[in-house]
Image: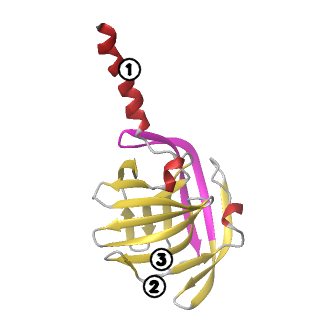
């Protein structure tokens, strides 16, 4: 009788741990939630590209991320529809497979061609990878590398801070500082799409 009572207790901790998404869940999707109720859905497009769909009410954005981090393409959404006139394409001088995965306390710089509204210009992007730390998202905890991204030339003096989760192969924006202030995004929970 005692064994019958203890057995469910032994199984429950394993079940609670099993709900945390893994990289394999990118095929169906990994959903993150923000403090303000926004969501960001990540899905694998290929071995080295992840699609991010960020929704805030009826508006949002969709981005393709090389290695789950480097923005290849970004477009705004309204009422679930893509707004083609807002599309920005970033042409890197290598394939997504050749882009480096972040390593703790290293840097990477690259020159890209930015194409927007029929125009193109060169942009120098700098990535500074911080130390390996831990991040909690709801009941789940992951190793994380914070990435500091800067762009040049940049009239708005933007510096983005992104959390990259190596075990999942994805990243999400937590802060954007610019000439007019700062925007913060607080992520509170994560789940696999079932």
- 3 vs 1, front mark: 1
Magenta part of the chain: 125-152
Q: How many marks?
A: 3
Q: Earlier in the sequence, mark 3 or mark 1?
A: 1
Question: What x and y, as percent, mark residue 81?
Answer: 37, 78
Few, some or many C-alpha atoms within 10 Å of disc 1 (few <14, some 14-19, many ≥20)?
few
**For the N terminus, which image quadrant?**
top left
- Give above or below for 65 relative to 131: below
Separation of disc 3 and disc 1 at Cα?
A: 54 Å
Separation of disc 2 and disc 1 at Cα?
A: 52 Å
**Disc 3 element:** loop
Label of residue 175 in the image: none
Task: Tell me the residue at 52%/80% (across/down).
Answer: 88
Separation of disc 3 and disc 2 at Cα?
A: 23 Å
Task: Tell me the residue at 57%/43% (across/down).
Answer: 132
Can residue 174 be seen in this snapshot?
no
- Give above or below for 159 relative to 139: below
Q: Nearer the viewer, residue 173 or 8?
A: 8
Q: Is residue 144 magenta?
A: yes
**Disc 2 element:** helix
Task: Tell me the residue at 54%/77% (across/down).
Answer: 154
Which residue in the protein does label 3 denote? 156
Q: Quadrant of residue 86?
A: bottom left
- 2 vs 1, front mark: 1
Task: Tell me the residue at 33%/21% (across/down).
Answer: 8
- 3 vs 2, front mark: 2
Question: In the orientation shown, which residue stands out farthest toward the top?
Answer: 1
Which residue in the protein does label 2 denote? 84
Question: What x and y, as percent, mark residue 30?
Answer: 44, 53
Which residue in the protein does label 1 denote? 10
């Amino acid at each position: 009788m005692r064994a019958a009572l203890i057995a469910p207790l032994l199984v429950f901790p394993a079940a609670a741990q099993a709900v945390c998404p893994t990289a394999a869940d990118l095929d169906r999707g990994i959903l993150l939630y923000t403090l303000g109720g926004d969501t960001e859905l990540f899905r694998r497009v290929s071995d080295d590209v992840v699609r991010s769909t960020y929704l805030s009410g009826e508006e949002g954005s969709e981005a393709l991320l090389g290695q789950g981090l480097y923005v290849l393409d970004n477009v705004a959404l309204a009422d679930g529809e893509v707004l083609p006139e807002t599309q920005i394409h970033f042409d890197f001088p290598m394939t997504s497979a050749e882009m480096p995965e972040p390593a703790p306390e290293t840097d990477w710089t690259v020159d890209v061609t930015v194409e927007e509204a029929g125009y193109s210009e060169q942009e120098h992007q700098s990535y500074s990878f911080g130390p390996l730390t831990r991040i909690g998202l709801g009941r789940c905890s992951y190793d994380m590398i914070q990435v500091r991204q800067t762009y040049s030339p940049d009239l708005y003096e933007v510096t983005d801070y992104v959390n990259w989760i190596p075990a999942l192969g994805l990243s999400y924006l937590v802060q954007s500082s610019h000439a007019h202030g700062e925007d913060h995004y607080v992520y509170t929970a994560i789940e696999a799409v079932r």
